[in-house]
């Protein structure tokens, strides 16, 4: 079974390094990016299953990055992280495809629990895609007999 690979995106360097260490102690492979632009660069090069994305960042804010991730990598699950949660930003993120929201400071176990839920959702979607693709290549017995006549 594939292990979850996560990326933390936050402009607070100390938060990134501390959270990365804590998650890696729990056995999770964690990449980091200090900006939305750098996160998109990482996604070009690496398979990432779940992104924990800060909403308030200089340059591209979290909602802009979320929209870009969902456009380019629709199976990547994104959990928005904010210390400045408003109902409007939460609704915008969820409408744009965020899996869920977490409030800063989020407990490591809470982050991990949400990330695992998101990863399981992604695995279910991947399985549905595999089944649909295999059905596309399978023929029914009736089709086989009809074509062999």
Image (spheres, grey):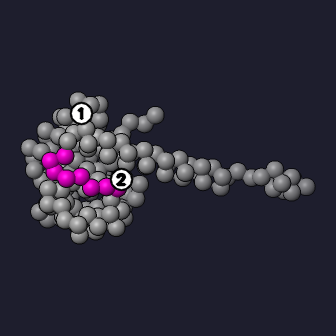
Q: Secondary structure at mark 1?
A: helix
Q: Secondary structure at mark 2?
A: strand
**Camera sees residue 11:** yes
Distance (Cα) linking label 2 and label 1 = 19 Å
From this view, report whether residue 119 is shown above or below residue 64: above
Left or right of 24, for residue 76: right
State yes or no: residue 53 in magenta: no
The dot on residue 77 is 2
Left or right of 67, for residue 85: left
The quadrant of the image that shows the C terminus is: bottom right
Work out whether residue 18 or residue 114 is closer to the camera in this orientation and state it: 114
Name the residue: 20% across, 42% down: 107
Residue 57 horizontal/vertical position (percent): 14, 60
The dot on residue 121 is none
Q: Residues within 10 Å of mark 1 (few under 14, many from 20)?
A: few
Mark 2 or mark 1: which comes first in sequence? 1
Q: Which residues are magenta?
A: 99-106
Name the residue: 38% across, 45% down: 117
Residue 49 horizontal/vertical position (percent): 36, 47
Residue 70 horizontal/vertical position (percent): 35, 61
């Amino acid at each position: 079974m594939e292990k979850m690979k996560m990326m933390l995106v936050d402009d607070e360097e100390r938060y990134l390094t501390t959270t990365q260490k804590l998650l890696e102690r729990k056995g999770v492979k964690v990449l980091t990016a200090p900006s939305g632009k750098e996160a998109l660069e990482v996604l070009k090069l690496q398979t990432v299953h779940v992104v924990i994305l800060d909403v308030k960042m200089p340059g591209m804010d979290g909602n802009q990055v979320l929209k870009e991730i969902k456009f380019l990598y629709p199976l990547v699950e994104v959990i928005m992280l904010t210390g400045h949660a408003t109902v409007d930003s939460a609704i915008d993120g969820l409408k744009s495809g965020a899996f869920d929201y977490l409030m800063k400071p989020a407990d490591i176990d809470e982050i991990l629990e949400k990330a695992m839920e998101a990863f399981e959702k992604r695995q279910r979607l991947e399985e549905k895609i595999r089944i649909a693709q295999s059905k596309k290549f399978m023929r029914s017995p009736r089709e086989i007999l009809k074509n062999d006549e």
